[in-house]
Image: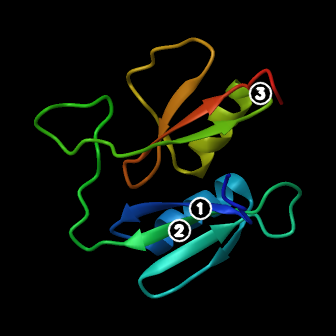
């Protein structure tokens, strides 16, 4: 037996839920639903399985570092976005306010850092898509 999913969500902590959700709204073109303690960004009206990201307001938030360092906040998760053209996606992400990580381990994809310090990757599509 498996769950009968109707959508999926990931939650990112941040010290500014409004600003971080605005970054991802611009990056992904999804619809933003602001709230007091959290803001939701969803792919409303788009094809595919319903997906959303919740940005949770955490006033004592400490940004992660990437790559990991024993003396700093460790990353707890990261987001992967599969794109048709990685170089074009990197340029667009930079124009939205992301930064390119100084450390890159692969030639085929890029690690980016969002304005709150969360790493995310821009990758080509997997072979099953």
**Could you tell which of marks 3 and 1 lies nearer the N-terminus?**
1
Circle 1 residue? 9
Rendered residue at 58%/11% (across/down): 107
Q: Where is residue 22 in the image (x, y as percent from the top left)?
A: 57, 67
**Could you tell which of marks 3 and 2 lies nearer the N-terminus?**
2
Q: Is 63 positioned to the left or the right of 57 in the image?
A: left
Q: Position of residue 98 (x, y in %)?
A: 51, 45
Instruction: Please say which color scheme the image uses.
Output: rainbow
Q: Which of 24 and 78 is in front in this view?
A: 78
Q: Depth-wise, is mark 2 or mark 1 nearer the camera?
A: 1
**Could you tell which of marks 2 and 1 lies nearer the N-terminus?**
1
Circle 3 residue? 85
Q: Position of residue 16 (x, y in %)?
A: 39, 70
Where's the C terminus, which quadrant?
A: top right
Give me the disc on residue 73. Answer: none
| Gap between marks 2 and 1 measured at Cα | 7 Å
The furthest residue to the front: 1
| Gap between marks 3 and 1 measured at Cα | 25 Å
Rendered residue at 65%/74% (across/down): 32
Task: Tell whether label 1 touches label 2 (CB within 8 Å).
Answer: yes
The furthest residue to the top: 107
Give me the disc on residue 54. Answer: 2
């Amino acid at each position: 037996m498996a769950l009968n999913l109707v959508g999926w969500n990931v939650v990112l902590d941040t010290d500014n839920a409004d600003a971080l959700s605005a970054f991802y709204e611009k990056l992904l073109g999804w619809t933003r639903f602001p709230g007091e303690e959290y803001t939701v960004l969803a792919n409303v009206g788009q094809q595919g399985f319903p997906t959303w990201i919740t940005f949770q307001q955490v006033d004592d938030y400490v940004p992660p570092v990437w790559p990991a360092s024993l003396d700093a906040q460790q990353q707890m998760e990261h987001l992967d976005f599969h794109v048709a053209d990685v170089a074009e996606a990197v340029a667009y992400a930079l124009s939205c306010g992301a930064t390119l990580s100084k450390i890159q381990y692969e030639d085929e994809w890029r690690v980016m850092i969002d304005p709150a310090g969360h790493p995310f990757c821009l990758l080509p599509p997997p072979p099953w898509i």
